[in-house]
Image: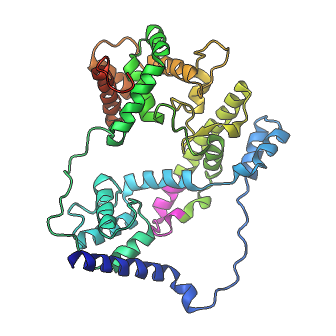
Amino acid sequence: MAAVAVLAACALAVASAQALATQTTQTAPAAPVAPVAPVSFEPLIRRLVESGRPEAAVRALFARPEMAFDPEPMSTKLTELYMSKYGLKLVTDIQTRLAELGYHPWPTDGRLKRLTKWSIRAWQRECGLPERAVATTELLAALRASTAKAPAGLEFPPIEAPSVYESALTPERLAEAREFLAANRAMLSRVRARYGLPEEVAVGVSAVETRCGRYLGDKPAVASLAGMALARDYSLVSQAFAYERPAPDRTAWLAQTARDRGDWAYRELVALLDYAARLGRDPLSMPGSVYGAIGVSQFMPTSALTLARDGDGDGVADLFNEADALESMGNYLNKAGVGGQTSEAALREALFRYNRSRTYVNTIMAVAAHLRETAGSGAPGQ
């Protein structure tokens, strides 16, 4: 009976939230809505042409349907940076309501980190909802309408965060790493001989970055970078902070940060176009991360231009080719100080210079340790 009551309370909360989201159209006739014109890339096109790029080629690229403006990359980056610096009112309000319902015994700091995500998922799980730890106004409305208290005896996670990315160390992900090592052992040995990068560490990087090449991104990197470059104009993404309503000084900070990040994205966009031309590839055929990293080892385009290396002897340094990606990774990490390190501590510090996250480094080393432990043990993939 208690479970039924909880589900009923959750259902009421979700229904109430949906009603709140649509109440204006339910209580009054909707006014005619003018179609929203697509955001024009013209300022970015002019900037590229003024830098010396052929206008016909630039306009042909941006005329393709895949190049529609997407505010998400810049909105996401600005939200992450703002939340880290100031905290978000929306997250604070979600934390406050979760605490009232008994799901969040920790401080309300306005930051969507591990414990707050756990609280959101715990409430969603109790209500039989899809578990999506995303801070939205719809989630807040549902929480405010909910009367479902946390069940007695709910076990909360420890405050201390895991020291690794646990999602990268599941049996499935470790099996992928073993298979990648077995399939590319000869190439990895050549990379070690040339750059001093241990085979298991190289696989660890590939496993964390792209699941050993299985996941390279959902959309073309050129589209993501172009959208961020255009969104140096903060007005294009300011709607992401509608609930926040930042004070003037914080709005000024957001506008300046958008300009800085947009200019960074422009430099990466130019590098990506140059790299695609070097390969003789259509830029739109190159998937990437939300912030434009490409290939099996996820290089930013500026790094691809200077650090990519040919690993299979065909005269092309293609980061989407496994041999080239591993060769390039060895070169990159060698320059970061990885090559030839004889102690684990020294190797860790070199990896940290490559990516300044201890959790990232710990995860790579955990994958590498697993690969060493299972070598010759008869584990699948060996």
Look at 63% across and 12% down and name the residue there: 313
Q: Nearer the viewer, residue 249 or 171?
A: 171
Q: Is residue 331 left or right of residue 119?
A: right
Look at 56% across and 62% down and name the residue there: 238
Q: Is residue 132 left or right of residue 275?
A: left
Q: Position of residue 337 (x, y in %)?
A: 40, 17
Q: Residue furthest top?
A: 193
For the record, the magenta segment spans 240-256
Q: Is residue 10 left or right of residue 272?
A: left
Seen in the picture, residue 341 relative to 174 is either above or below; the reply is above
In reply to whether residue 254 is colored magenta, the answer given is yes
Q: Nearer the viewer, residue 16 or 38?
A: 16
In reply to whether residue 286 is colored magenta, the answer given is no
Q: Position of residue 265 (x, y in %)?
A: 60, 42
Q: Quadrant of the C terminus?
A: top left
Specify how the rendered protein is coloured.
Answer: rainbow
Q: Position of residue 261 (x, y in %)?
A: 55, 45
Q: Residue furthest left?
A: 153
Residue 355 can be seen in this image: no
Q: Residue furthest right?
A: 56
Look at 30% across and 26% down and name the residue there: 370
What secondary structure prevails in the magenta region?
A: helix
Look at 36% across and 64% down and name the residue there: 91
The image quarter in which residue 333 lies? top left
Residue 289 can be seen in this image: yes
Q: Is residue 175 left or right of residue 122?
A: right
The image quarter in which residue 116 lies? bottom left
Q: Quadrant of the N terminus?
A: bottom left
